[in-house]
Each structure stands twice: as structure tokens, then as C-alpha cells.
Image (cartoon, rainbow, N blue to C red):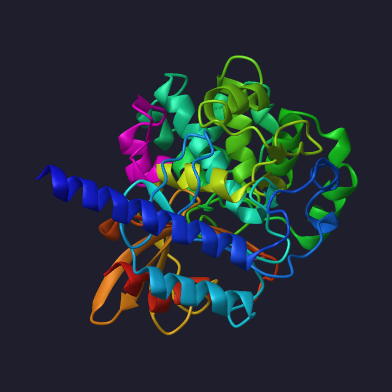
Amino acid sequence: MIKQKIVTSLVVTLLMGSFSQLTLAKCTQPIEATQAELEGGYRDVTELKSAFIDAAPKRKNDGLAVGVAGIDGGNRALLIKLAQEIENNLHGQFDSLLIAHKGKLVFESYYSRGRINLPHYQASATKVYTSMALGRAIQLGYLSMADLDKPLVSFLKGLDTSKLTTGSDKITLNLALTMRSGIRLSDEQKKGLQQISEQLKGQQHAQALLERSAPISAQTQTFKYQDDPMLIMHVIDAVVPGTAQAFIKQELLDKLGIKQYRWQTADNGLPEAGWRVNMTSRDMLKWGTLASNKGMWQGERLIPQGYIAKAISPQLYTGDEDIFGGGKDVSKQGYGYYWWNAELQSGEKRFYSVSAQGGGGQYIILVEELGLVVVVTANRRENSTLQLMAERVLPAFL
């Protein structure tokens, strides 16, 4: 038995050593952005001449557990082949692909302007972070699960409700979390609000939206991809002690060990709720791991399990006509609390997937049945990332 353990240990050591050599052979440029590049941002980073591919990611003392592809899960050869195809631009303009299996990061790769320490712009993937912040407020008792079905305006004490459009009290937190606030503004009204946006501080912004909207009813409260997340941010700011910005930093970013990020401020003075956030790929993986672990992070409950269950479950189906990153093996698209969901067909099996999605190709993808959390960053909106998950990533873990 002792001899067997020694042999196994030697094999693992040799394999990890060979994987490290692969990484050095594949990329001679520094994989970390310089301080000047970090200050300048994504567009100021030079493109990698060759991909950085690591089938045995290094421990970074950042709170992420690491493993070895082929030992801790996944078909190493299939994953490397996929990474090489991505390097050759056969699947779109990727910046990173990270794969965690059963809680361990087992595959890490960077391309183009992707860097291990560079926060990548997120676009609408930001909405998921806003949803998780509301969940954190519930965990700490500033809201309750029952509050999800209460009128959103009841939490905004700074509003003059006498001036709000008819039906404003029909907007619940649940509806705003699923893009069904029912707010409807004409293009002219949107343009007008944009022109005075810097004057609408705090809840004045929510007041302006709800004053100008057409009457809200069951007929208007259908799925519409718009600025509902900012209404949720207003509620967070209203119920937590201090500001929403300080709350998010102290209660989520600091807890997750997220230090290198950018979270921009909206004209109304609140943190952006639906876009304009930058996160590193490894930190994106932390958000996905938090959701995959039902709201637990390193033994501490950050978000109620019941909230996570609602957030990543289909609260409605949006149809299969236009699936971002989709293809022939992606169907039954739905929507939770800013998390998209869909079925992925791999061979004869179908797998339920959940994903944060951002225009340009940012994804945090969960496939619970296989214990997978996958992160993708890219720099082109045209992509087939979910289809690629079904065709190439899932088979590597079956």
C-alpha cells in the first residue's frame, strides 16, 4: 500500500511537471499585465503572440482550489485540442477559457488580450453580480425572501408616490429581477432622460423613470431586456447600512477575495447595475463557484440557499429564436434572477445549464450535473460559446 502511494505521488508529480513545461512552451510573453497595462485597461494590452495553456493551474493564494486536468476531471487531450483551436481563431475571438470541476480549477488558458491579473470588461454579466448583492442583503436580514413579492417602491422612501405612473406599485422585486418591471418609455423619453441623467441623483433617477413610464399593468409586465437592474440597485442602496458601493465591497468583493477589479459609478451616483464592471477571469470563477455552492464560500454562507435556487432556476422561458452564443444543441432558453438558462445537448444526453452572459462574449456557465463552472471572456459579440460547451467541453467530462 505504501509503495502504491509513493508511485501514485511520483506519477502526479511528473504529470504536473510536464503540464508546467507545456505552459512555458506555449507562451513566452508574460501572462500577467504590467502595472501600466492595468492602469490603462483592456484596450492598452498587447495581444499575445501565442496562447497560454495550463492543464495544471497554479495556486495563487486567491481562494481558488486548483487541480490537474485528467486527474481531477476532464479529458486533458480534448481540452488542449480545443484550446489550440481557439488559439487559431477557429471559434471566435477568445481572451480566456477557465474550467473548474467539482470545486477545483483544472484548466486555465488565455489568448489575445487576456491576462491572468487583468480585469476584463463584463457588460451584462454585471447583472448577475447585482442579483447576488441583493441575495447578500437578504442573508444579512436587511430584506427577507418574502420581500421579493412586495412592491419595489415600498423600499424607496425618497419617492413621491403621488407622481408615479399608474401601476408602479405592481413592480415587485421578483419582477424587476426577471426583467418584467413593465416600465415602458418611448425613444424620445429615453433620450430626454439621458440628457439629464447627471442631474438625477439617488432615488431621483427611479422617480424620473416611474413618472415618465406608460401605465404599468399585467399586459406590460412581460420580459424586456432593459434597465431593471438599476431599480434593484436602488433597493440595495436604500436598505443596507451605508452605501450600496461600500456594501458590495465589504460583503461580497472582500469576502470573495476580489481585489483587482473596476466597478464604475452610474450618473445617479450608485454602482452600475447592468454593465461597466471589470473582473479577472479567476474572480469570475469565484462568482460561479459561489452560485454552484448554493451561496456558500469557504464555509461561510454569503447568500441564502433559497435565493440561489430562485436565481438560477427558470422563472420564465424566453424562447429559442435568439439564443446568445447558441447553436443546434442549445435549446429551452429561460431566465432567472439575471441568470440565463438553457439545455445543452451532448450526445444522447441533455444537461441543464445556467449562465451569466455579457455582450462581447463574457460567460460564467454552470452545469451542476457534471460539477462544472466554466468562464469565458472574449472580445466579439458574435460567438457560439454555449454551442461550443455542448459540443466540446461537456464531452471532455462525460
Please identify the residue farthest to the front as the structure is shown: 3
Q: Residue 273 in the image: x percent, y percent?
A: 65, 42
Asked which quadrant contains residue 157, the reply is top right
Left or right: 199, with 275 as reference point = right
Quarter of the picture containing the N terminus is top left
Does the rendering let one see residue 378? yes
Please identify the residue farthest to the right as the structure is shown: 195
Does the stretch in magenta take in 10?
Answer: no
- Please say if 361 is above or below 287: below
Most foreground residue, 352 or 221? 352
Q: Residue 322 in the image: x percent, y percent?
A: 53, 76
Q: Which residue is located at x 73 percent, y 59 percent?
A: 29
Q: Which residue is located at x 38 percent, y 50 percent?
A: 67
- Please say if 391 is above or below 195: below
Q: Residue 203 in the image: x percent, y percent?
A: 71, 29
- Please say if 323 is above or below 337: below
Q: Which residues are magenta?
A: 290-310
Quarter of the picture containing the C terminus is bottom left
Left or right: 19, with 124 as reference point = left
Left or right: 249, with 373 as reference point = right
Does the stretch in magenta take in 300?
Answer: yes
Count of numbered marks: 0
Q: Which residue is located at x 44 percent, y 43 percent?
A: 174
Asked which quadrant contains residue 130, the reply is top right
Most foreground residue, 83 or 339? 83
